[in-house]
Structure formats: C-alpha cells, structure tokens
Image (cartoon, helix red, strand yellow):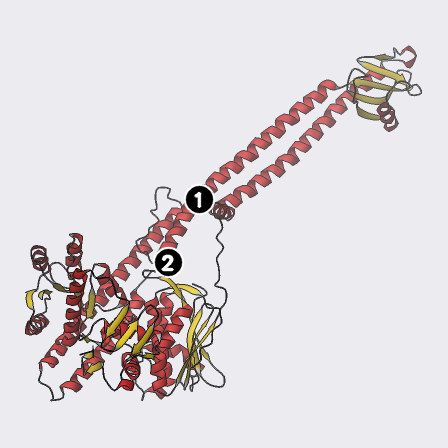
Amino acid sequence: MTPCYAHGVVRGMFLAPKWFEQLRWLGRSSTLRLAALLSAIFALGFVAAIFVALTLGERALERRVDATLTVLAQSSTIAEALGDSPSMILRPLDNLAGLPEPFRRAVERGRGTVHLRNDLMRSENWRVLVAADSTNQPVMVAVPVDGTADAQELLATILWTTAGVVVVLSLAIGVWGGLLAQRRLMRINATLSQLAAGDLSARTGHNRSKDDLDDMSQNLDQTASELERLVSQTRHLSASIAHDLRTPLARLRAQLEMLPDGDGRGAALEEANHLSGIFDTIMRVARIEAGHGRDGFAPVDLDDLAQDMVETFGPVVEDEGKRLMLETATPATVQADRAMLVQALANLIQNAMVHGGDQITVFVDGQNLGVSDNGSGVDPAQFAEIVKPMVRLDGARSTQGSGLGLALVRAVADRHGAKLHLDAIEPHGLQVTLDFTQM
Amino acid sequence: MRILLLEDDKQLGPWIAGGLREEGHVVDHFDDGKDALIAAMGQEFDLLILDRMVPGLDGLAVLKSLRASKNSTPALFLSALGEVDARVEGFDAGGDDYLTKPFAFAELSARVAALGRRRESADGSKPVETTLRFADLTLDLLSRKCERQGQPIDLMAKEIKLLEYLMRRPGRLVTRTMLLEQVWDMSFDPTTSVVETHISRLRAKIDKPFNDALLRTRRGEGYVFGA
C-alpha cells in the first residue's frame, strides 16, 4: 500500500492578554451599558437645560437694561447731552464719532450688546439701545453691563460644573455596579465552564444579596448538585453491574478451566470468552457515556494516530484480501483521550472490514478523523438508526458483530464534544467522520 | 515467590491460590482488605495480587497506603472494573499490572511470572540494553536494524516493538492480552486478529527463511520466544 502524506500548518491560537479580555468583558456588561446610556442621556439633558436657562436669563436681563435705557433716554434731551461718561454714553444718531465699530453696528440694528476686546472704553461689555429722548429725537444710549455679564458667567460655571459632577458620578456608580455584577456573572460563567469541563463539584457559592443573579446562582448550584449525584450514582451502578456480572463469568471460566480437556471444554471456554467480549463492549460504551470531563485528555496528533492505526490494522485487513489506506491533509492536533480514539477507529475499521468493500481508508483532514470504505454503504435514511446501541441492520444479521460498533463511536464522539457525521460516498460506500472542529 | 492474594470471592480465591501454589509459589490468601494491609505492612512479599472490590478496605486503598509507606512490592490488580478509567485508577494508585475478570489462569500466571522477573532485574539495576541478542538473532534498537545469521531483516516499527518485547522475555509465556497492552497500548480486545496477524508476519521474517523457529505458539495460552 502507498500511504500519501500531505503536511500542513497546525492551526495556531492567538491569545489576547488578560486585561484585554477583561475590558472586553466589561464592554459586554449589561449594567455598564445601561449606566453609560443613562449618563449620556443625563449629559444631553443637562446641556440642553443649561443652554436654555442661560439664554433665557440673558434675554431677561437685556430686556430689563433696555427698559432702563429707554427711561434714561426719555428723561434727557440730546441738546443738553453731557456726552460720554464712564457710566453712560448718550449721543445723537448722527454723531457717533470716536465710538468703536461694534457700537455703530448695534445702532444700525437698533439695539445690541457690545463686547470689546480692550479696555479703551473702561468697560468691556456695553448694552446699546436706540431710543427717543424727551423731544422725541432718536438717540443712542449705552451703559456698561460688566456686572451682569460676570454674574451670567458665574451662573454658567456653576451649572456646567454641577452637570459634569453629576454625569461623572452616575457613570462611576454605573461602572462600580457593572463591575460588581460582572464579578458575579464571571463567577457564574466560570462555574458553568468548570461544570462543562467535567468538574461537577464546581459551585457558584451564591450569597447574600437575594436578587435575580443570586436566584440564578442558587438554581445553578442546585442543578449541579443534582447532576453530581446522578453521575456518581451512574458510576456506582455501572461498577456494581460490572462486579455482579463479571464475577460469575470469572467463576464460570474458573470452573471450565478445572474440567479435564475434551468434553466440549474448548467450545465452552470460547463461548464464555464471547460472552465476556460482548459484555466488555457494553460496559465500555456505558463507562464512556457515564464518564465526564477531560480526565486523561492530552494533545493527540491525529496524523500520528491514523498512521499507528494503519500500521496496526493494515496487515489484518490485507489478510482478508482488502486494502487499508491512509490519507492525510493538514493534520491537526486535538485535545483527546487517545485510548478512546483508538477504540473508536478500531471499531470503524472492523465495521468496514465486515460490512464494507475491499478499499478501506483511514483519513485525517484538519480536525476531522474518520474511516471510509467502498462497500455497499448504508441507506442514508438509516443513519440515525445505526448509531443506536444494539442495532444491526437486517442485511447485516448474518454477519458477525454485536451491533455495538457505532454506538461506541458515537459515545466517544459525544465525550469529546465532537460531531459524528455519516455520509454516503458516490458511487457507493460509507464515510464516518469524527469532527473535532467545534470542541 | 511469596505472594499475597486479596480476593473475597469464595470460588475464585481458592482457585487462584491453589493454581499459584501448584506452580510452586507460597500464597497468603486474605478475603478482607484490612487483614491484607496489616500482613503486607509486617511481612516481606514478592508480589501482591489485589482484588479491587473487597470488604473492609478495597484493594486500591490497600495499595495506596502501602505505597505511601514506601513499600514498593510489585502489585497486580484483579478487578471486575476493566474500562480505561478504572485501569488508570489502578496504575495511579501504584499498581504494576491490571487484569480484568474473567481471565484465564494462564494469563494470571504469565503476568505473575513477568512481575516477579521485573523485581529481579530491578534489583540488579543493570542499564537498559539497546542491543538485544538471542542465539543468532540481533536487534539493535538505536539503529533499528535486525539481522539473523548475518542477514539483515527489514522490520516495520510495530514489528520492532513486538520483537523487543519478546526478546526481553526469553523463555517466558507472553499472552495475547499482554502484547495488546504493551505493544499496541490497547486495553480492549479488538475482535480482529491483530496479535495473530503481526506474530505471523514477524515469524515469516525472523523464522521462516532460516528454518528454525525461535517464536513458538502455545495453543490457547500465548507465545514463547526462544524456548
């Protein structure tokens, strides 16, 4: 036989640093998201409210100053105008000489607030209004409004600071609550992972807070206890079944061995062997199914495993006048119990030898491992049936085997979290694949 | 050899003890774990044969206690629990071999002999040989070359492992299950004839061309190399 090899890159794994993981976790925390959203809404509301309050306040002040200016204008006559003083400017509209440009623009608009960069006019902020004097002549009257501007500024500072503090506080409380909830959720998550990995003694250790998370922890712990009890019961049960059945088998064997040769002793011993062989297979499936966790799991090089199987079973298959081939493409390494995979592959090869054609292939394709043959195959409608224990299809009744082959393969796949695929091969044949991709 | 047997079954215990005595061993038979532990603590044995499920203290606990007190007597577990996990428990507890019930007496006898010998060779603390010789057959484990009567023999990897296992136990009975466990690392019995096929291939390479059989089959029991 000519095994063909194709070597590829074993899939590497990129591991992000721990703090990065935690940050991502934080980003996925629902409490934190809620807090961030609320803080954002708060902030928006504050900005709008402060903006409106400041604008309205400024308008109200301007109206009051304008009213005063109107009264001032009406109580004076432009003829007796005293000109400019630090506290008031009163000018006829045709005599604006000496006043900075912003004053002119305010006069054109009829009113306005003037902000000056330098202190030429002694005050930086002026309110300008065009009003009628006592003789009903239009005049420009302006007063400094530095005091009110300062007050406005102070008010704005107070409002913005308050808003900032409130937003930061709400965000901080949100982060704190989020972290707290996250820690508890991480604990629950870690417990679930431990349980999934087979450590049935894992508990969340729920506590005091009596909230929804605590209820959930409590329920999870109860479920885990129940699971632990059931699994240990099953293990005890399978141990006592093994004891109760194998001990009489051992006695039977001992008694047969003590008989003198002949008298059908050999045939009886063979039957006894056959019986314990069937029982071994049933027990093996039961133990694999009852087992849990990753005890005994180690990295298994699928390429190496498949080569080993072909080397072991190749001569056996050849003696049957058939061929056992090896096909590998980008073989991967998976976390697995090697002994179980060997049992599964041995079963598949034996099945193929009994039911399949004269070409049997052990293949590895990435994280897929399996056996295919070019025999008459199996009707796809019966795929679900043949992985059940003790099922042998009618056509196969006459051939040997206890019918437990594929049940064991399925149990091994389940134990590894691998998928078991059965596929028909064109033009004829069956392909059974253990797919470890989802592990 | 002086053997301690812990087995509570009323039929199997006497059968095993009787069989071993017939082979010339001295057997102390116990059916309670505590008694067996006390005996093993106080006296020197060459081998311990322990059933896992017995009243009092089970065999696993007995051996764990002994190993904890630095007792290194070879130990063989007999058990109705034969699945991989149960075997691993046995080896983890310090067991040297593990035999699942039901078993043929020849199987037990071969393993008892192997464990007794292991003790002898361990006492001599000889370095592990890398070139094995028996009569006119040579197996170099480093260069992976084999020759007989000066003629090179081309062996596959598994055949080298198989031949090495046999050559390290000249004149001893080696059973099919021992070979499956040690050479193929299979603690289960494949229904196909893996051992028979590989033995016959090996025989075709090392014996047939030279008209002289080094590897013999003992019907119903196993194989003997160089008897």
| Residue sitting farthest toward the front | B150
- In the picture shown, does residue A43 fall above or below A6? above
- In the picture shown, does residue A211 fall above or below A386? above
User: Viewer-nearest of labels 1 and 2?
Assistant: 2
Q: Classify mark 1: residues with Cα within 10 Å, few (<14), some (14-19) or many (20+).
A: some
Task: Residue at 86%, 28% (x, y): give it.
Answer: A109
Q: Position of residue A388 (x, y in %)?
A: 35, 76
- Amino acid found under the numbered disc labelled 1: Ala
Q: Please give the chain letter of the residue carrying mark 1.
A: A
Q: Position of residue A375 (x, y in %)?
A: 42, 86
Do we see residue A387 in this rendering?
no
The C terminus of chain A lies in quadrant: bottom left
Judging from the image, what secondary structure is the residue with disc 1 in? helix
Quarter of image, res A262: bottom left
- Amino acid found under the numbered disc labelled 2: Ala
Do we see residue A312 in this rendering?
yes
Classify residue A19 as left or right of residue A210: right
Which residue is labeled 2 in the image?
A196
Nearest to the observer: residue A164 or residue A423: A423
Quarter of image, res B130: bottom left
Task: Residue at 45%, 64% (x, y): give it.
Answer: A438
- In the picture shown, does residue A7 fall above or below B125? below
Q: Do labels 1 and 2 touch, CB within 8 Å?
A: no
Which residue is labeled 1 in the image?
A181
